[in-house]
Image: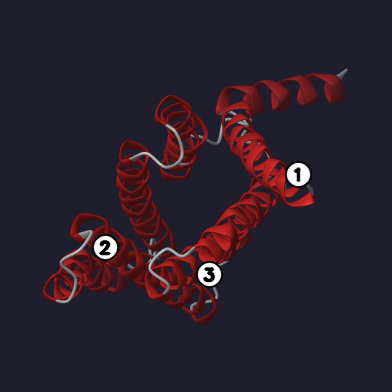
Amino acid sequence: MSEQILNYVLQYGTYILEVVVCVLLVSRGDWRHHKGLCLYVALLFSLDGVARPAVLNYFGLKSNEYSYFYWLTDVVLAVGAFLLTCSFFRRACSQEEKLWRFVRLMLFFVPPLVVAISVLVLHQNYKNLFTMFIIEFNQNLYFSCLVLNTLLYVMIQHLAINDDELGLLVCGMGIQFAGEAAFLALFHLTVGENFSRVIATVLSPACTLGMLLIWIYAVAKTPEVVSVGSQVGRQAALAEAVSD
């Protein structure tokens, strides 16, 4: 009973925080500055909070349809996380064009390399080939993102980039990548045994919850964006009050 309550808390707590992140970005006028972040959180909520529960309720937990849908959407989320990491690199290199050209080249070769490494599993597993390849691909991509995220954090510290919000966003992403990589590695090694599934119901949502909490703090602590027109209006009103 307590395990079920914990699962409900993590599951619905994650859904609530995903909505809170989007509402914060939109209400504060920051969504244009955080397009990648806003799109990723919206994708995370639409797939994990809406689409997966709908398929689960319709087909059932042990159905092949739900299993295939879950792992395919996991590929979409993994690719989305990689693209978000790329956007963080671009933001960190906004003042370093030469560095960005090198980083962009490095990021370009990551997906083909992940696919090539994942293909090696094909000659070793002929049962559940489709599912095993997806798990292998996701595991390698999340691990690559974890390494890239760590390099990004080191780069931010080394270049002394004055962007506290970016540092917090990267830290939150690191928690998510670490949890996903650990879960997929465990699931792959145990071939989806029951205890790994039980751990997954706690580990993955808990890491997502931690990531979203850090992101909410990062977004909320940033001063609200004020339009140029409103700034000029306030300055004019202040000057008129002083002159009177």
Image quarter hosting the C terminus: top right
Residue 169 visible from this viewpoint: no
- For the residues labelled 3 and 1, the Cα–Cα distance comes to 42 Å
Specify whether 89 is left or right of 1: left
Q: How many callouts does the rendering have? A: 3
| Residue with the mark numbered 1 | 5
Camera-nearest label, 2 or 3: 2
Specify whether 32 is left or right of 222: left
| Residue with the mark numbered 2 | 132
Q: Residues within 10 Å of mark 3 (few under 14, many from 20)?
A: some
Considering only vertical position in the picture, is 215 above or below 14? below
Q: Tell me, what colour scheme is on the image?
A: secondary structure
Query: Percent from the top left, x then y, of residue 117?
Result: 19, 75
Label 1 SS: helix
The residue shown at (72%, 24%) is 234
Earlier residue among tags 3 and 1: 1
Residue 30 visible from this viewpoint: yes
